[in-house]
Amino acid sequence: MEIEKDYPFNVSLIKELTKFSERTIQNYTVKTNEIVPFFAVKYNGEWRYTKKAVQTFVLMDVGVVSGTEEVPKYKALELVYGVPVNFSLAIMKKER
C-alpha cells in the first residue's frame, strides 16, 4: 500500500472544507476507524484520509444528514460506505 497515493488527504484539507476543529476531526477519526477499518491511517504521526473519508466529513458539515448529535455521523458513513446506522450505533454503545 502506498500511503501517499491511497490516503492523499490530511487534516488540514478537512479543516479547510468544514467547520470542524483539528481536535474534532481527530476524535471522530479514531472512533470511525473502529467502524470502518482503514477510514484513515496514521502515517509519520499524521492522519491521512481517502477521498471517501473527506466526503464523509463534508456531508456531516453541510447538514445533508441531520438529526441528533450522533446520527449525522453514522448516516454519513451509511451514505458513503454503506455501513448501516444501527450497526454503527451498536458498536459505539458496546464500547460505553
Image (spheres, rainbow, N blue to C red):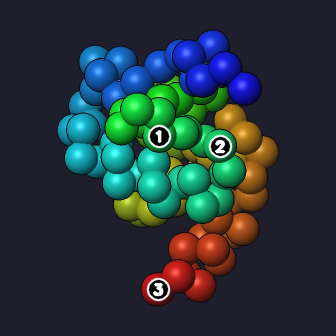
Query: What amino acid is labelled 1 in the image?
Result: Lys
Along the line of sight, which residue is nearer the eye, 39 or 67? Answer: 39
Q: Which image quarter is the N terminus in?
A: top right
Label 1 crowd bin: few (<14), some (14–19), many (20+), radius 10 Å:
few
- Residue 66, above or below 60: below
Dot 2 or dot 3, earlier in sequence: 2
Query: What amino acid is labelled 2 in the image?
Result: Phe
Q: Residue 14 at what x, y percent from top left? A: 37, 25
In the image, taking residue 64 as reference, residue 20 lies left or right, namely left
Residue 50 is drawn in which quadrant? top right
Q: Are marks 1 and 3 in contact (CB under 8 Å)?
A: no
- Residue 42, numbered circle: 1
What residue sits 28% from the left and 48% below the top?
A: 24
Badge 3 marks a residue whose secondary structure is: loop
Q: Nearer the viewer, mark 2 or mark 3?
A: 2
Query: What amino acid is labelled 3 in the image?
Result: Arg
Residue labelled with disc 3: 96
Badge 2 marks a residue whose secondary structure is: loop
Along the line of sight, which residue is nearer the eye, 64 or 90? Answer: 90
- Residue 84, above or below 54: below
Residue labelled with disc 2: 38
Label 3 crowd bin: few (<14), some (14–19), many (20+), radius 10 Å:
few
- Between the residue at mark 2 and the residue at mark 3, the CA separation in whole angstroms equals 22 Å
